Amino acid sequence: MEKHSVIEASGHKFRTNNISSRVQKIVISPIKEMSILADEFMEKTGNDVISFGQGIPHFDTPEYIKEGIITALKEISTAKYTLEPGMTELRELIAEFLKSSRNIKNIDAKKEIMVTAGCQEAVACSIATVIDEGDEVLLFSPDYASHIEQIIQFGGVPIFVSLEEKNGWILKIKEINQKITDRTKAIIFSNPSNPTGAVLTEKEINEIAGVAKKHNLIIIADETYDFLLYDGKKHLSPSSLEDIRDRVILCGSFSKKYALTGYRVGYAFSDSGIIDHMLKVHDAIAICAPAISQKAAISALSGSQDSVVNFVEKLTSNRELMCKKLDEMKNLFEYQKPFGAYYILVKYKIPEIDSLNLALKILYEAHVITIPGIAFGPTGEGHIRFSFACHPKEIEEGFKRLKKWADNL
Amino acid sequence: MEKHSVIEASGHKFRTNNISSRVQKIVISPIKEMSILADEFMEKTGNDVISFGQGIPHFDTPEYIKEGIITALKEISTAKYTLEPGMTELRELIAEFLKSSRNIKNIDAKKEIMVTAGCQEAVACSIATVIDEGDEVLLFSPDYASHIEQIIQFGGVPIFVSLEEKNGWILKIKEINQKITDRTKAIIFSNPSNPTGAVLTEKEINEIAGVAKKHNLIIIADETYDFLLYDGKKHLSPSSLEDIRDRVILCGSFSKKYALTGYRVGYAFSDSGIIDHMLKVHDAIAICAPAISQKAAISALSGSQDSVVNFVEKLTSNRELMCKKLDEMKNLFEYQKPFGAYYILVKYKIPEIDSLNLALKILYEAHVITIPGIAFGPTGEGHIRFSFACHPKEIEEGFKRLKKWADNL
């Protein structure tokens, strides 16, 4: 696929001498490029910017977790590397959580779970573990931007399976089957989906499982938004299917559920034979997940889950608000209402501008951050992603700016 | 090189189906394997274990840094992802530190510095940025174990340049020149050295610089132990040499200097053209360094450096103690006295046992963790590494056990 760097689109030239061709092929995910460019823009112009960009909840970390951190600071173990696979207590809590939420009978916390420096690192370790140079990984288009970069980074080839936007970004199992070759090693997806908010149905999960079994593929399921569903939708994980459990890597997160994005703590759950190898990659890139963040995660899982209920309520209300605002700009925008996560991938009706340049234009002219759809795969072109994790006041203000900007188009 | 996994030597079989050949070639660094095996051993037998293994200072994080963390918890920004390259304030503090400690005139904190999830991640990003599949990286043998795994992990080939043990692990520049091919892309080393404690002289640094310039190589300098030198030795960084600065990546750490190993925060300093690319890898594996750890690093650099002086004094005294204890076991052990870091790479006079099996034997029979020398490259065979970062009481107790064990050999 073509490179899709906002920074390059804005005119930046990259060094080529001494740089690997592999890294020359990847970009900083436009999700973060937009934050970097916005930071530069604010510094240069003194303007403020409203962010519908990177998916950061506007909530602060709940008090009970902060209290856990302050207690942890009194323990000398917080200063030190933890065991490389993570604190035993945390792995046990994760095992309990997965058993109850995924309906899994037995989990060996010490052998099947590893704690990582965020879900991002869990996915990176997964990919590194299952592909060699030139191997292919299937991913949905659109799907989370970094999955693309992670595959290329480790020498793999991302093979896009396009989703059908009409009726809510539906999976086309036929296309999956068509794209499998003898180099295909894995299939990766976020579910609920970043950036579309689509939620895989039981039928879709079963279809993916069937393909994986037939073709000896690994399923990498990024379940960061497992807790965040709307309209009564249910989260289903391929790791719940007993007969494919040894070929599923579930990558999980504490970031969004507990407002811990800055803490960089997540986990992977898989067959012990896979975790064995993933731990080697984890060691080479991180040594261990941050101890203080592991303690935060222990507090998060041990305490009352009321804050999660509260977050979900607020985000549900944000979703309604943003949909309403988008509906008011029907002449420019259309979208599929999300059933999970906190993003809307919006199709724009502005002719002759690609999503990279539109996102830049909106930043510089309207002072609002959005993410260019091309970041999420070729099917994302013609779209921009909006996050509604921000404060409702920011949604109000951001759309005020967008409307004013649209009036001058 | 042959695989050098303690876990495999102890009888563990690894899964091969669905696993990349690249990852099958690497190991969890025996530094952490030994901790994992010791943890299992303690749980199984109820024995306690003295660790001369992983290099973790026995000090707690200094109080002024903890206070900074508690203050940071009151700011909502601590909950959130930071800017992908790191907090601006921290990058500026690192720039100031490097300017004064490395005698560098100008540093662009925003373009030449990135904050990472530990020095380990900085090195991983460096290697990923400069090598493609099959490229060669020169490294000293012995050198820090993870550098080997990091090279192989990203598809590279580690090419070992053996050091001369006699007279203190001396660099043989002639051997470097002999090992350069048209696939050589970089040279990597830790200085002061983990595991030997050797400190590169000005002449050695200049020789390496000359080779790098002549053959268009990148120098990756892991300067984790820059603060920890003995007997009046001085730390010299290749990044101080103006004419090669655009080909040096300096990887730095807060872990040992401020007793922050568990926090996973470090940095890289290089030419902006290189940092540009390293940021892409950083995004794909970590998103950003932990915010709370970045705040800890800000506190660490802003406050009084008295705690560092205190740490160095204590470690200097530990060095004397451990050398004395080793001298008392002359019949079994000999070593080069380290001039930096907190390790001694000890040559053992026990026939017919390789270092993997000796480290296992010492763990299971003497209940002391040491690290097998083979972890550090082929020249490390016949040696085991001792860390003297632990409490002096642990050094006393560990050697009491070793002597008793030796008596029964």
Image (cartoon, coloured by chain):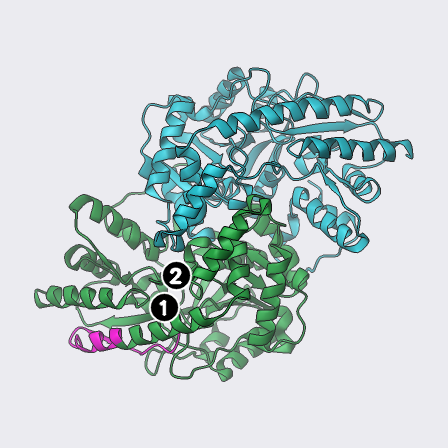
Chain colours: A cyan, B green
Q: Is residue B232 covered in magenta? A: no
Q: What residue type is labelled 2?
A: Ala
Above-or-below relation of B139 to A333: below
Left or right, A9 with reference to A181? right
Nearest to N terminus: mark 2 or mark 1: 2
Q: Can residue B23 be seen in this view?
A: no
Q: Nearer the viewer, residue B178 or B205?
A: B205
- Magenta extent: B321-340
Circles 2 and 1: CB atoms closer than 8 Å: yes
Q: Can residue A25 be seen in this view?
A: yes
Secondary structure under the numbered disc 2 in the rendered image? helix
Q: Which residue is drawn at 65% across and 77% down?
A: B243
Q: Is residue B336 covered in magenta? A: yes
Q: Mark 1 points at which residue?
A: B195
Left or right, B356 with reference to B119? left
Q: Mark 2 points at which residue?
A: B145
Q: What residue type is labelled 1?
A: Pro
- Which label is found at residue B334? none
